[in-house]
Structures are given as C-alpha cells and as structure tokens.
Image (spheres, grey):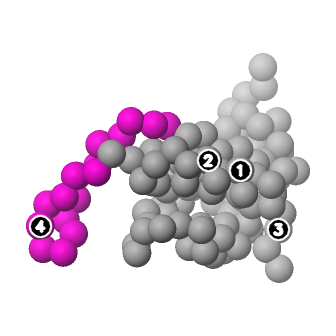
Amino acid sequence: MGEAIIAESSEHLVVMNTCPDPETAGRIAADLVDRKLAACVQVLPGLQSYFHWDGKVDREEEHLLLIKTSSASYPALERRILELHPYELPEIIGVPVSEGLPGYLSWINTNTQQDD
C-alpha cells in the first residue's frame, strides 16, 4: 500500500446528494457514472432527514448519494443533478478531499471528464 498524500488543492471532491427514493437515487447515480461526471457513486439507503421547510420542521426518509468526482467535473455534475432531481432545492454539497491513496485519486481523474 502507498502512503496517503495531501492534495495540493481541492482537486477531488466527495459530493453529497439526498434523494427521495431508491429509483431516483439509482437513476441519478447511474447517469452520473455513465456520463463520466463521477467515477463512483455509493447509495446509502435508510436515512431519516429532519429539516426546516416552509416554516415547519419536516422529516423524510431519504437515500444519500456519496459521489466521487474531480473538481473540474463539479460544474457539469451539479447541472446534471439539477436536471434530474425532483426536489425544488436538492442538497448538493461538495467536500474537498485533502488526503487519499494516490492510485485511487488517479482513478477518479481517469474516470471523470474535465469540464470545458
């Protein structure tokens, strides 16, 4: 195994996105990988989300997408999620990857397109 490296910038991201059901989560995950906007998307079912919406506290069962992508692919990835997502205001949060296995980070780059 190689040593973990510290990325020089936010070259890689883990993007979080919640979906209302397994069908939506699967459709978005497959589309992002197929279009090379994400190298990998993991779907975590069974979330309970509590949040303020329309002046009240709401609760929903959701599925969390953990999307591995490059920073260069983020703008196109965000646009595509907005096109596919049924929520009025979907959660789309990119978290910079500051460390990672060099081979895995290289794999992310190989499997994501660069936004023009």
Q: Please, what is the three-letter code of the amino acid marked with disc 2?
A: Gly
Report the span colored magenta. 44-60
Crowd rating for badge 2 (residues with CA inside 10 Å; few <14, some 14–19, many 20+): some
First-in-chain label (2 vs 4): 2
Q: Which residue is mark 3?
A: 114
Q: Are marks 2 and 4 in contact (CB under 8 Å)?
A: no
Looking at the image, the residue that sits furthest to the front is 23
The secondary structure type at the circle numbered 2 is: helix
Please tell me which residue is depicted at 42% across the width and 53% down the height of the picture.
20
**The quarter of the displayed image where residue 32 is located:** bottom right
Q: CA distance from mark 4 to mark 1?
A: 33 Å
What x and y, as percent, mark residue 104?
77, 37
Q: Which of the labelled discs sits on residue 80, or is there none?
A: none
Of badges 3 and 4, the one in the foreground is 4
Crowd rating for badge 4 (residues with CA inside 10 Å; few <14, some 14–19, many 20+): few
Q: Which residue is mark 1?
A: 30
Closer to us: 81 or 114: 81
Q: CA distance from mark 1 to mark 3?
A: 18 Å
The secondary structure type at the circle numbered 1 is: helix
Of badges 2 and 4, the one in the foreground is 2
What x and y, as percent, mark residue 1?
78, 20
Q: Please, what is the three-letter code of the amino acid marked with disc 3?
A: Gln
Crowd rating for badge 3 (residues with CA inside 10 Å; few <14, some 14–19, many 20+): some
First-in-chain label (3 vs 2): 2
Q: Which residue is mark 2?
A: 26
Q: Which residue is mark 4?
A: 56
First-in-chain label (1 vs 3): 1
